[in-house]
Image (cartoon, rainbow, N blue to C red):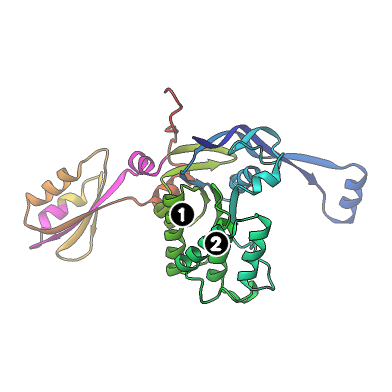
Amino acid sequence: MRIIEARQLTKSFRQAVKEPGLKGAAKHLFAPRYIEKIAVQPLDLTVEAGETVAYLGPNGAGKSTTIKMLTGILTPSSGTISVNGINPYKKRMENAAQIGAVFGQRTQLWWDIPILESFSLLKDIYQIPEAVYKTNMNQFIELLGMSEFIHLSARKLSLGQRMRADLAASLLHNPPILYLDEPTIGLDVSVKQKIREFIKKINQEQQTTVMLTTHDLGDIEDLCKRLIIIDHGAIIYDGSLKDVKSNFARERVVFFQVASPLPALLNQLAQAPDIKLDIQGELEFSLSFDRFEYTASEIVGRVMKHGEVVDFRMEDANIEQVIKTVYDGNLDLKHSRPQEGA
């Protein structure tokens, strides 16, 4: 079932063009000039209930603008949006009741009161039944490790503690949709892992739909099965994380440990134009190759013909390398999510 659907969605802003100084300000006052900046071009987007989607792009690509339209903060310039059957900018109260949101460095907690009291206020705002509230609080405190700071005010929390509290606050009313904008920014590894495990558990147990924007590629690999890449306000790739790696991660690396030096082989490989040799030691080296030109068995077999292989391991390009290639414009991203009936 489609829980988020946008058709031909666009957003543009009118920006003032001013010359510098007092003269420029006076001139703009009497003869103002404006330019139109297109943040989101005609965009079609569907998200199924229970999906975990990474919505990615470089700074200024239109990610946050899209999320703000889906949450009802911004009104689209044109196009239609439906979020769980509701128009988010026309019915903002109803839409707010069915979504949770964590926006990076911004908090939804009250700054000067204990976290527990903030949760109690949210309980009243969202009209959460007492039994649901107690169940969720007990679960969140345990899973997110909040017992040590639940009685502190938001201003006394570390960044990691506040992010965990914000995540709990956003899910207190059991929303079917969760928007996450840089949820692990600036956090240490242990806190990141705790937050990721919590999000995965909520998605699996409650089928909460998760839409994530992030520059932390560890978040993507840990949480998301689907990848949407946007650039200059337009979607340039929409497909599974597995497919984007399979289709676009061309380079594969095999690391070898051999029983004795293989100078003849290494000299031969050093001259090969389509295989990259990297020598780590007398008995250790790696070979990088195009997975569409060679198979791993061909590479391993080639080495084994020249000597005894003690051990080898293989690595594919990680998601960071793939996304960097996409951002650099080195891929022809024609592979989009197939349409129904295609």
Q: Residues within 10 Å of mark 1 (few under 14, many from 20)?
A: some
Whether residue 262 appears in this view of the structure is yes
Span colored in magenta: 240-267
Marks 1/2 in contact by CB < 8 Å: the verdict is no
Helix, strand or loop at disc 1?
helix
- The residue carrying mark 2 is 168
- Amino acid carrying label 1: it is Ile
Among the 4 quarters of the image, the one containing residue 127: bottom right
Q: Which mark is residue 53?
A: none
What percent of the width, then of the height, locates residue 17? 79, 45
Q: Is residue 312 left or right of residue 338?
A: left
Q: Nearer the viewer, residue 318 or 87?
A: 87
| Residue lying farthest to the top in this orientation | 341
Helix, strand or loop at disc 2?
helix
Q: Is residue 259 magenta?
A: yes
Q: Is residue 137 left or right of residue 123?
A: left
- The residue carrying mark 1 is 202
What percent of the width, then of the height, locates residue 149? 55, 75
Q: Nearer the viewer, residue 209 or 316?
A: 209
What percent of the width, then of the height, locates residue 269? 18, 50
Q: Nearer the viewer, residue 226 or 169?
A: 169
What percent of the width, then of the height, locates residue 293? 24, 38
Q: Residues within 10 Å of mark 2 (few under 14, many from 20)?
A: many
On screen, 61 above or below 137?
above
Q: Is residue 164 left or right of residue 16?
A: left
On screen, 290 above or below 162?
above
Residue ID at (66%, 37%) = 87
- Amino acid carrying label 2: it is Ala
Q: Is residue 280 magenta?
A: no
Q: Nearer the viewer, residue 222 or 286?
A: 222
